[in-house]
Amino acid sequence: MSEAIDTPEAVAATDRVEGHTSDLLAKFRPLIAEREALLATGVRDPFSIVMTEVKSPTLAVIQGKDTILLGTYNYMGMTFDPDVIAAGKQALDDFGSGTTGSRVLNGTYNPHKDCEQALKEFYGTKSAIVFSTGYQANLGVISTLAGKGDYIILDADSHASIYDGCWLGNAEIVRFRHNSVEDLDKRLGRLPKDAGKLVVLEGVYSMFGDVAPLPEMVAVAKKHGAMILCDEAHGMGFFGPNGRGVYEEMGVEDDIDFVIGTFSKSVGTVGGFCVSNHPDFEVLRLVCRPYIFTASLPPSVVATAATSIRKLMHAGDKRAHLWKNSKRLHQGLRDLGYTIATETAQSAIIAVMLPDQERAVALWQALLEGGVYVNLARPPATPAGTYLLRCSLCAEHSDERVGQILGIFEAAGKAVGAI
């Protein structure tokens, strides 16, 4: 007789048979065991780093020493901009620390409306709605636009907030292969012609830093009568002549129905938004549950966002320097022998690919000890079996700093056998 194995499912079943309350966390035991085994090797927990002091957009104190930040989404370095900070302080004095209410009740102050006005100016649209987070922007807009009986067609590598928006709205989900125009066309062609269809795309995909072929995909979506939503969370600020995103860079502004974005990256604070020229767009304020049933952002936060957005309209020099940094680091890492997810620098995200979790964690720790913080990414945030270190460059990284980063990558890679 084979020996019984105490799988989480078996444990839960035994609990029920014996009359005990089943443990709803039992299904996570394999992950718990994996984490404990990893930490037992002596490495730090990559997902619980604490920054005890932040000195600038590119430097923080971690584990008691100055550390170069290469794992934040502070692309345009706006978090310490003097005008942005002054606007937040003034709003804190004028309006207090929070609204204690929803946007549809007592939670709309002058700074909220000014922030939405700044977005309309930045994007050149008729309407803008601000949400409390970028996650809620996707969750709210997608679930409100497409419901039961409608179809959402999305890239298989879409962000979790996009998937969650699909599930909340109870729409039919149709996935197509990552960045495949052919597969998008094929799957749209199989859907009922009279059904409501929403194609969801991302300008920049956050794990690998690659961009979508938007002109071809937009043409296919329009051919099949679908509306289009483009998430520009990682494109806002440095793509396009005005920094609106990849969709501006690629010349499809007039064909995108809804643009989603966030304040937690290039804008340098927290919050999310959707902009649109649809004549009925404002009805979302009355029917979008993640907008209606959550507290609005503190006035100080939206005041910093509005100031930052208006400054990003005139940040051409910063955009140019960020692209210079990205291209230099991408080529430098390839020259050292690292495997990078993209052949060329496509965005401010550079993903260093590793063959397994052990080597990914070892390199991550060696970099941290050398004075550089990057993000460790693993499933389910990445495709199954994919482990990477995600580098996010900032317009405030100096030429000297990028040189330091490459030197630390060389020393750390050789120390752990990654190169």
Image: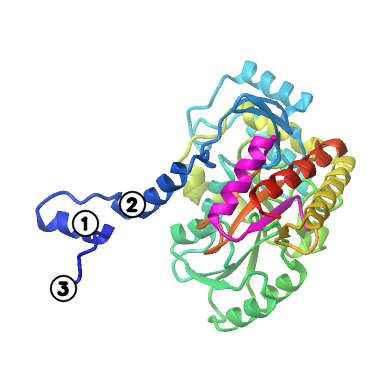
Query: What is the x, y in percent for residue 77?
Result: 76, 35
- Residue 63 located within the stretch drawn in magenta: no
Query: What is the x, y in percent for residue 375?
Result: 62, 45
Q: Residue at x 47, y 66 (%)?
A: 171
In front of the other: 60 or 203: 60
Query: What is the x, y in percent for residue 41?
Result: 47, 44
In front of the other: 356 or 239: 356
Tell me the amino acid under the disc marked 3. Answer: Met
In front of the other: 131 or 331: 331
Tell me the amino acid under the disc marked 2. Answer: Arg
Residue under label 3, please give it.
1
Q: Earlier in the sequence, mark 2 or mark 1?
A: 1
Specify few, some or many for label 2: CA neighbours under 10 Å numbering under 14, 14-19, or 20 or more: few
Distance of label 2 from label 1 (alpha carbons): 11 Å
Residue 231, can we see it? no
Q: Circle 2 sits in a helix, a strand or a loop, which is it? A: helix
Disc ID at residue 29: 2
Instruction: Give the position of the N terminus as an image quadrant.
Output: bottom left
Q: Is 162 situated left or right of 27 in this image?
A: right
Tell me the amino acid under the disc marked 1. Answer: Val
Instruction: Confirm or deny contact between disc 2 and disc 1 (CB under 8 A).
Output: yes
Q: Residue furthest top?
A: 93
Task: Look at the image and give the residue range highlighted in magenta.
Answer: 346-372
Q: Earlier in the sequence, mark 3 or mark 2?
A: 3
Specify few, some or many for label 3: CA neighbours under 10 Å numbering under 14, 14-19, or 20 or more: few
Q: Circle 3 sits in a helix, a strand or a loop, which is it? A: loop
- Residue 362 located within the stretch drawn in magenta: yes
Residue under label 1, please give it.
11
Instruction: Confirm or deny contact between disc 3 and disc 2 (CB under 8 A).
Output: no
Disc ID at residue 370: none
